Image (cartoon, rainbow, N blue to C red):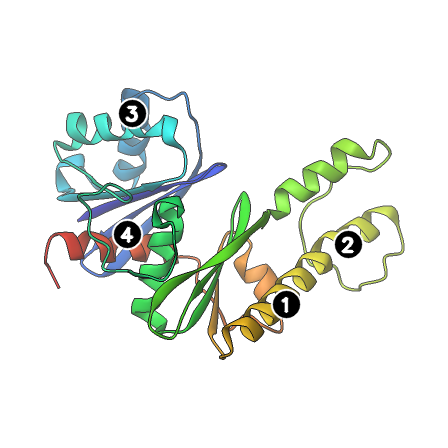
Amino acid sequence: MLFVLDAGNTNTVIGVFDGDTLIHEWRIKTDRHKTEDEFAMLIKSLLAHEQIALSDISGVAISSVVPPIMFALEKMCTKYFNLEPIIIGKETVHTQLKMAYPNPEEIGADRIVNAVSAIDEYGAPLVIIDFGTATTYCCINSDAAYQGGLIAPGVQISLEALYQKASKLPKIEIQAPEKVIGSSTVEAMESGLFYGYVAQVDGIVNRMKQEMKTDPTVIATGGLAPLITDQSEMIDYADKHLTLKGLRKLYSINHHQE
């Protein structure tokens, strides 16, 4: 079995693959201060709940945009799994991703993983939208090369800024309101946040398509992907497991299993 882990700024997503099939997935809060022992005990308990032992894991692949967490994660793998993990972003790890981007070293590991996964599953050209702490838009051109993209504040960041900076506004949940025109302060906030984000997505993707001079397939991933996709006119598919599948693909590439 393959153990995969994607550490984001807010949440860490964990998965276990049996061959090509994702059989289990968990989402935990990212904690920059956890030790390798604390990570191991948490992960051991999650695996044990599904009757999986640490010794059942034969490989590990990790991507992270949180550098302080990496020492503990790598130490956990060698100490408890007795395995050297594949770390996306290290020079020794091959991605087979072509580049049309002038500074490849600036691209986050999660964006690399998503690109490899999306090209493998959907072909090219592509626009990949990842709804995380930040919302990232990545462009894959017709040659299946990473061309570039943009980074916008995430939905949760926008919500927290609204709550913190406007003293009379309450804290709300992110959900799709039934109508655009709100009949209360809460409804107005829900509508502004949600439909404002949908409009941002459709507007940005439309401009990207014009600049690309082609009609790329648009893939959304991340926790809010299904919610936004349902109302977006530009998103073709929501794939919440895109990053985990990309980690499996990159592990296979680096172990010559395909």
Graded by Cα atoms within 10 Å as few (under 14), some (14 to 19) or many (20 or more), the crowding at tag 2 reads some
Residue 238 on image: x %, y %: 48, 65
The residue type indicated by label 2 comes to: Gly
Q: CA distance from mark 1 to mark 3?
A: 39 Å
* In front: label 1 or label 2: 1
The residue type indicated by label 1 comes to: Asp
The residue type indicated by label 3 comes to: Ala
Between discs 1 and 2, the one toward the N terminus: 2
Q: CA distance from mark 2 to mark 4?
A: 35 Å
The residue type indicated by label 4 comes to: Leu
Q: Residue at x 83, y 52 (%)?
A: 188
Left or right: 65 in relation to 41: right
Residue 85 on image: x %, y %: 19, 39
How many numbered callouts? 4
Q: Nearer the viewer, residue 74 or 177?
A: 74
- Residue 72's tag is 3
Q: Residue at x 34, y 65 (%)?
A: 145
Q: Residue at x 42, y 25 (%)?
A: 32
In which quarter of the view is residue 54 placed? top left
Left or right: 42 in relation to 30: left
Q: CA distance from mark 1 to mark 2?
A: 15 Å
Between discs 1 and 4, the one toward the N terminus: 1
Graded by Cα atoms within 10 Å as few (under 14), some (14 to 19) or many (20 or more), the crowding at tag 3 reads some
**For the residue labelled by badge 3, is the local secondary structure a helix, a strand or a loop?**
helix
Between discs 2 and 3, the one toward the N terminus: 3
Residue identifier under label 2 = 192
Residue 142 visible (yes or no): yes
Between discs 1 and 3, the one toward the N terminus: 3
Between discs 3 and 4, the one toward the N terminus: 3
Residue identifier under label 4 = 247
